[in-house]
Amino acid sequence: MKKFLALALAGVLSLGLLAGCTNGGNPTPGAGSSSSAGSSGGSAEALNVAVFYYNYADVYISSVRNYMDEKLTTLGVQFQNYDGGGNQTTQSEQIATAITNGVGLLIVNIVENSSDDAAQNAADAAKAAGIPIIFFNRDFGAEVIKSYDKAAFVGTDAPEAGHMQGEMIANYLLADYDTYDLNGDGIISYVMFKGQEANVEAEYRTQYAVEDADAILVGAGKQPLSFYDAGNANKYLVDQNGNWSAAAATEYMDTVLAQYNEANKNMIELVIANNDDMASGAISSLQAKGYNTGEEGAPVIPVFGVDAIESAKQLIAEGKMTGTIMQDAAGMADTICALVANIQAGADLMANTAAYNVDADVAKIRVPYGIYTGE
């Protein structure tokens, strides 16, 4: 691994990527990144932290970044933010550069988590340099964390979002089932927007949102949900770019509604999305057809997302979106910064975490989800 790291660093240096970021190759300075920021009362040199985000374009991740900037500034550490731009090679180069430049702590929102390789490489690089590493948000196998005693993960219990969404959907439908069954066939037809193939969160949300909703519906004497397109064996539409984007959902939904609509008596009766951005994209398409406009008396197709970002909360308040699962951006930033404070104080990375929801056999902290319907 040391040989690999040395080669990677040489490649980075030869390419002139010392700044290590997309958008011109420049990292984004944190509010506490100046040479004097983060010092208090003449204390020793501030801890130097590098924070790597998988993609600034992700709305939820942007929320985490805003909270993190605030918390790290309050802690008084020096920090530098890096945008991976959804490219694992870019992020790996950024990590190598930060280590070469003498960073004291890595905080990594890994780009690629369909396998453990990228996270393991980052952990190995941190271990070779003798510095701690905190992964967050995008989960992977426990063995990565177990491989290094100065590694930890802060995220969620990935299946929990799917379970909560399935429960929320079923209970909402059962409250007024006949209204949502537009063609009166006794079955609710749905579309599922999946953010990314092989992503842990996307896999569980896609699976359990439907499985759990079906279990509740069948238990109440109703038919299970039915994917609108019988020819689609996957029973989802995936963002082919892996960006979980509103644009992808709008494009898909425009195509779907051209064929599946009330005039053809096969209208989509429910929208399930792995995140709020895709939910909002589906809503934009529905609004172009006169649905979910928020106007009194306008027809509404139930739309559910995940994250509870501010724009989704606003859509819910306006009656354009039905509900979402809250992924606590502030709570995630707070938890990460509690670990940063441990390193800052010279304590073990996982010190003072007894009150957190920590996995039994590995240094992974789970920040709980919550149901949000605006009520």
Image: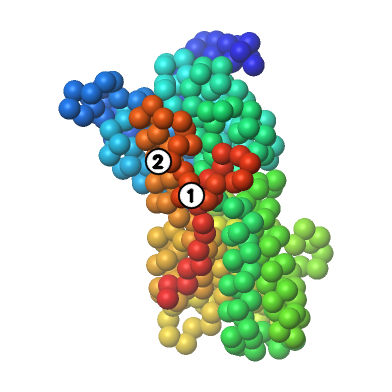
Question: Is there CB contact under 8 Å for labels 2 and 1?
Answer: yes
**Residue at 65% in and 48% down:** 200
Q: Nearer the viewer, residue 140 or 187?
A: 140
Query: Which mark is drawn over residue 7?
Result: none
Q: Residues within 10 Å of mark 2 (few under 14, many from 20)?
A: many
Expressed as whole percent of the image width and height from the top left, the position of residue 232 reads: 79, 61
User: Which label's residue is closer to the chain start, 2 or 1?
Assistant: 2
Expressed as whole percent of the image width and height from the top left, the position of residue 107 reads: 47, 33
- Residue with the most extreme left position: 41
Left or right: residue 63 versus residue 120 is left
Is residue 176 placed above or below 35 in the rendered structure?
Answer: below
**Residue at 64% in and 76% down:** 170
**Residue at 47% in and 19% down:** 99
Residues under labels 2 and 1: Cα distance? 11 Å
User: Helix, strand or loop at disc 1?
Assistant: loop
Left or right: residue 195 versus residue 62 is right
> Which residue in the protein does label 2 denote?
338
The three-letter code of the residue at mark 1 reads: Tyr
The three-letter code of the residue at mark 2 reads: Ala
Q: Residues within 10 Å of mark 1 (few under 14, many from 20)?
A: few
Residue 122 visible in the picture: yes
> Which residue in the protein does label 1 denote?
356
Q: Quadrant of the N terminus?
A: top right
Residue 259 visible in the picture: no
Expressed as whole percent of the image width and height from the top left, the position of residue 139 reads: 60, 43
User: Helix, strand or loop at disc 2?
Assistant: helix
Q: Nearer the viewer, residue 19 or 368?
A: 368
